Amino acid sequence: MDEQTWQRWADAVPRRTSRRRFEDREVPSPVLDRLDTMCRGWRPFGQARAVLVRQAPPGLFRGIVGAYGSVRGAPHCLVMVGPGDAPAEVGYVGEGVVLEATALGLGTCWVGGLFDEGTARSLEDLGPGERVFAVSPVGYPARHKGVQERFMSAVARSRTRKPLETLAPGIGGWPPWAARGVAAARLAPSALNRQPWRFELSGGAVVLRVDHPRDTYRIPKRLDCGIAMLHFELGARTGGAVGAWILLQAPRVAVYRPEAPAARPD
């Protein structure tokens, strides 16, 4: 991935919000083509992938209580797919495509538990052991949030984002690049804003683990952690620490090791 793309995604992080209501118009083909090219080319973890579906099928999205939480008017969608034992990888890859959509002026919303699995599986040829972990609407978000969308936003806000010290104990003494990474991860989306990621500084690397082994909302916490992995990396890179993630066994998720000491001044 070129540096322009990394920077574009970093710029998109504070602009990304979850949207469930969309304007009644399709995205122009050249814009969809750019997003599709990213989907096809962004495969840092093998088979973990996001697939662009240009005509979102009826019935893909389901509401929480009646109409609350349902997605309306999205002309297109993304399907987040990968091996059944690779939720973190799928989260990482999918969030890259979501941020690309944000940079293109499009709205999205991670939907990890409330979608029709049969419909979702029909949208992509799945290999042995693969599954659809999540889907996302894609389109131009409605200019104003309706009552139902405001309700869902209020539900998410009922759990405010956790303090940096909770996500990364002792962060006050961390190197600037690592602190920037955690600050970017704090903005990552998660199921009902549960923020299950925790960071630990270990020598010159940062380890990511889940807060508790039990999953909730029928959505793997490691999927959320994969999303946070990408956000952390974007923040770390803005601090000059270009590196790579190495996947780990549960309850740890991965470790980020800079390739060289951060040189960019804070």
Image (cartoon, grey):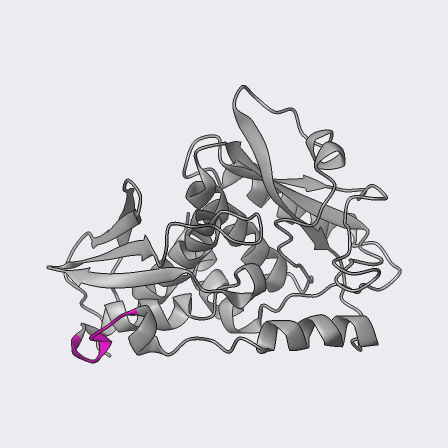
Identified at 25% across, 67% down, the residue is 178
Instruction: Say if residue 146 shows up in the picture.
Output: no
Q: Is residue 39 magenta?
A: no
Q: Position of residue 173 (x, y in %)?
A: 16, 78
Instruction: Say if residue 205 shows up in the picture.
Output: yes
Quadrant position of the C terminus in the picture: bottom left
Which image quadrant is residue 231 in?
bottom left
Q: Report whether 156 appears left or right of 69.
A: left
Q: Report whether 237 appears left or right of 188.
A: left
* In the depicted structure, whether residue 131 falls above or below residue 149: above
* Towards the viewer: 124 or 11: 124
Q: Report whether 133 appears left or right of 195.
A: right
* In the depicted structure, whether residue 136 falls above or below residue 159: above
* In the depicted structure, whether residue 225 falls above or below residue 154: above
Q: Position of residue 7 (x, y in %)?
A: 43, 63
Identified at 54% across, 19% down, the residue is 128
* Towards the viewer: 39 or 134: 134
Q: Which residues are magenta?
A: 168-173
Q: Position of residue 77 (x, y in %)?
A: 72, 47
Identified at 58% across, 32% down, the residue is 131
Q: Position of residue 84 (x, y in %)?
A: 49, 32
* Towards the viewer: 173 or 161: 161
Q: Report whether 116 appears left or right of 158.
A: right
Give the farthest residue toward the front.
214
